Structures are given as C-alpha cells and as structure tokens.
Amino acid sequence: MRPIHYISIAAAAGLLAFLYFGVNTTPPSKKKDAVAAGMAGGMSSTHTAMQPASFDSIENAAKKALPDHATGEIAVVEKELAGIEDSVKMAPVYWKLGKVWQEHKQFPVAAYYYAKSAKLENSEKNLNFAGQLFLDLMQRSSSPSVTMWEAQQSIACFQRSMELNPKNDTVKMALAAAYIEGAGETMQGVQLLLGITREKPDNIPANLMLGRLAIQSGQFDKAVGRFETVLKQEANNTEALYFLAEAYKGKGDKQKAIELFEKCKKIVNNPEFDKEIDNYINSFK
C-alpha cells in the first residue's frame, strides 16, 4: 500500500466544516485515490451501468436497525409533518426529522431529510451542509448502488447551491468530487475544475485535483505542471510534493521521484511515513 494516507488530501473533500460553519478545515479523504481515470483533452467520461439505490430501500433498511424508542421518536415527527400543509413550515420539521435519524447514526436518511429541508428553505448554507454530508458518506460507502445514490443527492444539493451563488469555488470543488468519485461522470467534474483554473490559474485545490487526475490518466507532464503551480505558492505542500514525485516516477525519472519523496519525508517528519516511503522507493529503484 502506498504511504499517501499520512498526507492530508485537500482537493476532493473534507469541506464540511468550511461549508457549514465557515471554518477553514480540511480533514483527509477516507477514500484514497478513488477518482475515475480521465482528463480534459481527449479522455471521455466514465459511464456506469450501475443503478442507484432507492431512498425507500435505504430508509427501510435503516428502520430495521433502529431501537424501539427511536422508531417512536421518528413516528412523532412524521405525524407532525403530516399535519402541515404549508411547505415553508415543513422545512424546520424535516430538519428535526433529519436530526433524529442522525442521533441514531442513520446518516444517509438524515442527509436526505436535511436536503429536503434545505431545498424548501432555499438555504445556501444548509444545501452545502447536506451536499457535503452526502459527499462524505459517498466516499465511505461500501455499496456501489448506495454510493451512486449519495452522489446524485450530493450533486442535486450543490447544483441548487450554485444557482444561489455561482461564484463559490469551494462548492464547485465539492460538486466536481461528487461527479468524479461517485457518479462516474469524470468530464463533468473536470470541466468544473478547469473552469476554476481558467479564472484563477493558481487555485491550489483545483490544481491538486487536476494533477491527481492527470496521473491516473497517464498524463504525467500535465500533472507535473499542476503540482509545480501549487509548489510555487506553497513550497512545503506535502500533497503536491508526493504526487509530483509520483508524476516523475510515471515519466520514468526515478531519481527525481526519489528526491521529491525524500523531501516529503522531511516535511511530514513521521517515522512510520519514513519507513513506508523507504519501502515504496525500494519497490521501484
């Protein structure tokens, strides 16, 4: 296994705290290197015949996992919803229902009701929260059909959010990740990323994600350019250093790759990371 799990992956996800609370926090992705192969300039989108799961099937499975008292709590909120005709007044009750599901760790169902509330309120903040929750769940899902459903839900939330605020590059990044990592619509995601870099050529998260995609599609020269753009701004960006080393390794320049891996080791300064990097280097020397 490559030692990348020691490095914070900022490009694709982990934006929940930023989107909802305005905190500049970027936890690592739990689904390493899960982007589909493909890049602009000759690569077609990755399509899949996979059918998404239905919400009914997800909710029914979740209900079976609930304790009796939780079933009662949900029934009370559902009864409250049934007595409301004004959709505006439904929004906070859907949010309440989402919180009950979340308290009992049924997160896909919780995200669904959060999204329903956010859409009724037309709240950019809450749409981003629900969209990112779906994205995080998608990146951790072990079921392909549920992953597809979560990706579609995430995309719907972020698209609605972008209608309210088309200039939010953080949401564009999250939407790109949902397209690429979950929906298999690589080119849709790539076009969003390229749109960001056309307006802001030095954008670090977009260049990082485009660079990783370039490596996965074998376009190592393009990858080098992306990561060098990042390193001109952040010389000690360990993600850019690591993947730049991977790009040079792909180009056949093993010495340059080793030099960059060694530099990455010094910055990370973790004995376990050092050991894994050394083993990795020995595997291709």
Image (cartoon, rainbow, N blue to C red):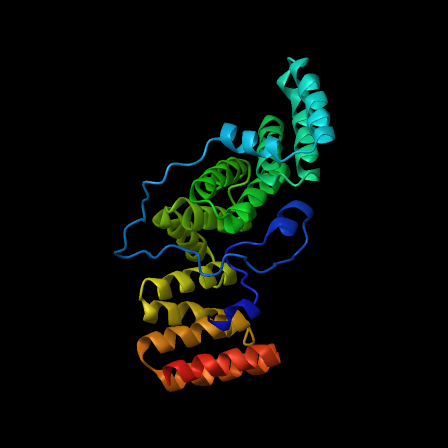
Q: Position of residue 79 (x, y in %)?
A: 69, 17
Q: Position of residue 218 (x, y in %)?
A: 31, 66
Residue 199 lies, with reference to residue 282, above or below; the image says: above
Q: Residue at image x 36%, y 63%? A: 216
Q: Which quadrant of the view contains residue 68?
A: top right
Q: Is residue 23 left or right of residue 112?
A: right
Please state which of residues 274 and 161 is positioned toward the viewer in this rendering: 274
Q: Position of residue 21 (x, y in %)?
A: 69, 47
Residue 255 lies, with reference to residue 123, above or below; the image says: below
Q: Which quadrant of the view contains residue 107?
A: top right
Q: Quadrant of the C terminus?
A: bottom left
Q: Is residue 45 left or right of residue 127?
A: left
Q: Is residue 65 left or right of residue 32?
A: right
Q: Position of residue 271 (x, y in %)?
A: 61, 81
How many callouts does the rendering have? 0
Q: Is residue 46 visible?
A: yes
Q: Is residue 169 visible?
A: no
Q: Which quadrant of the view contains residue 269?
A: bottom right
Q: Residue at image x 65%, y 45%? A: 20
* Residue lying furthest left: 42
Please state which of residues 14 and 88 is positioned toward the viewer in this rendering: 14
Residue 52 lies, with reference to residue 256, above or below; the image says: above
Q: Residue at image x 47%, y 40%? A: 146
Residue 178 lies, with reference to residue 37, above or below; the image says: above
